Image: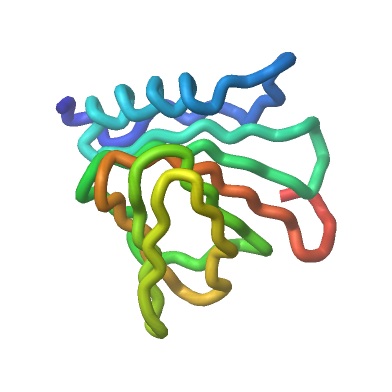
Amino acid sequence: MSEEIHAQRREPEQPEGVFDLHAAGRDLLEVAGRLSAGRASRTLTPGPGVALKQTLLAIREGQRLGEHRAPDVATIQVLDGTATITTADGRLTLASGEWAVIPDTDHDLVADADVVVLLTVVAADGTPN
């Protein structure tokens, strides 16, 4: 693991043609393993100026995002691994192939095992994120 905390930031981009989420997730897990934060992501968009944003996020086992609030309407789909979302009201554990709405309250996400998730955020007012 390097002393580097996060990967270099890049602008969201629209993939060309078919995009292999599983292959990209494996690549991101590899990158996450080299970073002290233990996570890496890639933001995908269907084009400029749209209200939809999807982020492929890989987190190494035991790492967390830390308490935060989803900016708008958001969902999470676990592509591989297991993660737990914790709020003041309880816990929600998701495994590979499972999907849920992200609570609109403060929450934390921890990787119970190496995990790759697809986060989808749609601006509640329809304006681009």
Name the one closer to the observer, 22 or 15: 22
Query: Hey, which residue is sitting farthest bottom in the picture?
Result: 89
Name the one closer to the observer, 47 or 5: 47
Report which quarter residue 16 is drawn in: top right
Looking at the image, residue 77 lies above or below residue 36: below
Position of the N terminus by quadrant: top left
Q: Position of residue 70 (x, y in %)?
A: 56, 63
What residue do we see at 54% from left, 42% from top? 118
Name the one closer to the observer, 122 or 92: 92
What residue do we see at 25% from left, 45% from top? 113
Looking at the image, residue 111 lies above or below residue 31: below
Looking at the image, residue 103 lies above or below residue 40: below
How many dots with numbers? Answer: 0
Name the one closer to the observer, 77 or 128: 77
Q: Position of residue 74 (x, y in %)?
A: 62, 59
What residue do we see at 81% from left, 42% from top? 50
Report which quarter residue 15 is drawn in: top right
Which color scheme is applied?
Answer: rainbow
Asked whether, in this view, residue 128 is left or right of residue 91, the answer is right
Query: Hey, which residue is sitting farthest front in the picture?
Result: 97
Q: Position of residue 66 (x, y in %)?
A: 33, 60
Report which quarter residue 115 is drawn in: top left
Q: Position of residue 101 (x, y in %)?
A: 59, 64
Asked whether, in this view, residue 13 is left or right of residue 57, the answer is right
What residue do we see at 39% from left, 37% from top? 58
